[in-house]
Every structure is written in structure tokens, then in C-alpha cells.
Image (cartoon, grey):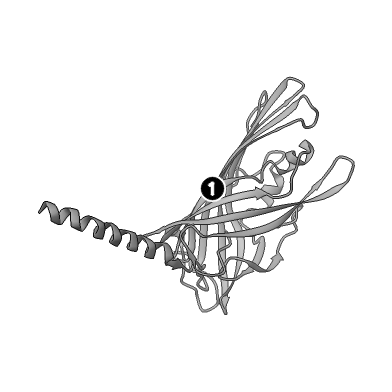
């Protein structure tokens, strides 16, 4: 019996190694899936703390916002989904050290406080119509309401073009425009890098890293980029074809802006979670969604 155990050991090890190699070679096709008439709602929580110190005087600003995004799928043709984005409600507050907290809940407050007027005007109305492909890349974008700031980037985490193995990576490169005090404009190269860390029970775990590629030593530029270098994780339901949760965190300091005796410490957490119970897939003959 003792000899059998010793003899079997290398074979067991070899079998385990072979299985591990097969698992490493296995690839997964990640694609978004949409159904005409489907209503997709996600809960978004954004928390931010910014501490600035100028000439020895510090001030801290805290902001928390909770909202529910609504994505109504109008059409799905040739793998392209067209949907309209709106916001069901917002519940947010901010407070600067030494001042009173200011809050606004669109479900309860008829008149928003100063500084929240624009947010209040964009609740419960169609904001943008998007057409995206199965990778989540925007094919067409149509603004349904004029907003003060241009929309950019992607609206959902982009997925890899080809089937990908565990440990595989894919990138989303983009440009970040910055403006210096003298009016000079610069373009900073950046990218989001995604890594497929695991797939278990049809849920893919994805690591998210936002990286600044252009070398930057100017504190004025660093202050404008401070919110970009974040890291996080996402969970993608392969069968459902939807991102079910993501969390992105940031903890960065900038020293030397707006002067040498200044510093800024920025900490934030962004989470978005699919509200599974609110998925509606039944569409009426006239194209309107049935609220159940």
C-alpha cells in the first residue's frame, strides 16, 4: 500500500498539472446581450472626499450621491442594441468643512438647493440615445438634452474582441485634454486595462486599471488627472450578458498645486450594481414597456 501511494504520487501530480494547463488554455467569449423592450436599471453610489491644503490652511469637501440609472432597450438589430438612458432619481449631499451640509433628494424635494439645479433638471427624462455593439463599444450617440459638459468615453465596460483566457488582458486607449492657466492645451494619453481574473459559475471577474501613459511632472496637470488613475473590479454574468457589479477606488495625492505650499488628497469610491428584480423584458405591441 505504501508503495502504491508513492508510485501514484507523480501520476496524480501529472494529472493535476494537465487539468490546470487545460483550464489555462480555455477561453471565454464575453458579450453583452440585450432584448428589445428590456428595461435595465442600475444603482450607482459615488463617494468622494477631497482635502486641499494651501499655505497651511486645510479644507475638506465630502460628497455622496446615490442614483438609479435606467436603460430602455428600443431595438436590437444585427447584434447592435439601441437604448435610451435616463436617471430615475438622485439622492445626494455635500459638505465643506466649516459649512452646513447641503442635500437634495429628487423623490422628496420639489425645489433643489443652489448648485443642484442642473442635476434636478436631468431626472426622469430621456438624456441620451446610444447604439452599442456586443462588446459595449458606442457605434452612435445622440444627445436628447443639451448638457453643459460634453459626454465622452464609454457607457459600459468594453469587452475583448476575441475569446479570452484567464489572465488575458485588453485595453481601451483614450485621450485626456487638459488646459493650463495660460490657456495652453495639452493631450494626455491614457488607457483602461482590463484583466480576466477568473470565471466561476458563469460569472467573470474582471480587474480594472486606469493608467496615465504620458509622463507628467507638472502639478497643474497632475491635479486635472487626479481622478483618472483608479483601480477596481467588475463582475460580468456570461449567460445573462450583463455587468452585474463594479467597484472602482481611487486614493491619490498631488503636491505643489496651485503653489509649492499646496497639496490635494483625493479619495473616491464608485460602485454600480444591476438591480436584477427590476429587469423588464415584456414589450407591448405599440413598443411601450409594461410596468409590472
Whole-percent x, y for residue 75 in the image: 57, 75
Q: Quadrant of residue 217?
A: top right
For the N terminus, give its image quadrant: bottom left
Whole-percent x, y for residue 8 in the image: 20, 58
* Residue that protrudes farthest toward the top in the picture: 56
The residue at the point 60 percent across, 45 percent down is 230
For the image shown, how many numbered marks are present on the structure? 1
Whole-percent x, y for residue 11 in the image: 25, 60
Residue to which mark 1 is pinned:
232
Task: Judge left or right: residue 219 versus residue 164.
Answer: right
For the C terminus, give its image quadrant: bottom left
Q: Nearer the viewer, residue 214 or 229?
A: 214
Q: Nearer the viewer, residue 58 or 45?
A: 58
The residue at the point 75 percent across, 27 percent down is 262
Q: Quadrant of residue 25?
A: bottom left
* Residue that protrudes farthest toward the right in the picture: 182
The residue at the point 74 percent across, 38 percent down is 223
Secondary element under disc 1, as helix, strand or loop, is: strand
Q: Quadrant of residue 169?
A: bottom right
Residue 278 can be seen in this image = yes
User: On screen, 161 above or below 7?
Assistant: below
Task: Judge left or right: residue 103 versus residue 280.
Answer: right
Residue 155 can be seen in this image = no
Please rate how many residues cluster around mark 1, counting C-alpha atoms within 10 Å: few if below 14, some from 14 to 19, many from 20. Answer: some
User: On screen, 67 above or below 52?
Assistant: below
Task: Judge left or right: residue 122 versus residue 256.
Answer: left
The residue at the point 59 percent across, 55 percent down is 193
Q: Nearer the viewer, residue 116 or 148?
A: 148
Task: Judge left or right: residue 182 versus residue 209.
Answer: right
Whole-percent x, y for residue 2 in the image: 12, 51
Amino acid at each position: 500500500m505504501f508503495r502504491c501511494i508513492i508510485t501514484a504520487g507523480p501520476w496524480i501530480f501529472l494529472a493535476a498539472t494537465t487539468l490546470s494547463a487545460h483550464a489555462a488554455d480555455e477561453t471565454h467569449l464575453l458579450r453583452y446581450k440585450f432584448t428589445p423592450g428590456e428595461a435595465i436599471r442600475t444603482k450607482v453610489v459615488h463617494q468622494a472626499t477631497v482635502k486641499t491644503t494651501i499655505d497651511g490652511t486645510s479644507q475638506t469637501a465630502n460628497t455622496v450621491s446615490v442614483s438609479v440609472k435606467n436603460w430602455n432597450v428600443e431595438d436590437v438589430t444585427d447584434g447592435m442594441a439601441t437604448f435610451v438612458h435616463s436617471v430615475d432619481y438622485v439622492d445626494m449631499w455635500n459638505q465643506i468643512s466649516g459649512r452646513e451640509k447641503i442635500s437634495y433628494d429628487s423623490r422628496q424635494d420639489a425645489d433643489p438647493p443652489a448648485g443642484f439645479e442642473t442635476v434636478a433638471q436631468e431626472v426622469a427624462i430621456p438624456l441620451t440615445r446610444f447604439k452599442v455593439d456586443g462588446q459595449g463599444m458606442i457605434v452612435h450617440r445622440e444627445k436628447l438634452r443639451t448638457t453643459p459638459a460634453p459626454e465622452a468615453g464609454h457607457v459600459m465596460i468594453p469587452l475583448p474582441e476575441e475569446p479570452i483566457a484567464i489572465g488575458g488582458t485588453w485595453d481601451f486607449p483614450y485621450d485626456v485634454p487638459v488646459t493650463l492657466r495660460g490657456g495652453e492645451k495639452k493631450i494626455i494619453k491614457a488607457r483602461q486595462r482590463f484583466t480576466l481574473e477568473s470565471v466561476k459559475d458563469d460569472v467573470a471577474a474582471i480587474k480594472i486599471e486606469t493608467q496615465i501613459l504620458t509622463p507628467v511632472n507638472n502639478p497643474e496637470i497632475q491635479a486635472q488627472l487626479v481622478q483618472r488613475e483608479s483601480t477596481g473590479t467588475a463582475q460580468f454574468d456570461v449567460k445573462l450578458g450583463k455587468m452585474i457589479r463594479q467597484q472602482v477606488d481611487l486614493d491619490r495625492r498631488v503636491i505643489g498645486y496651485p503653489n509649492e505650499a499646496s497639496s490635494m488628497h483625493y479619495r473616491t469610491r464608485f460602485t454600480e450594481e444591476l438591480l436584477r428584480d427590476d429587469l423588464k423584458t415584456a414589450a407591448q405591441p405599440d413598443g411601450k414597456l409594461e410596468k409590472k
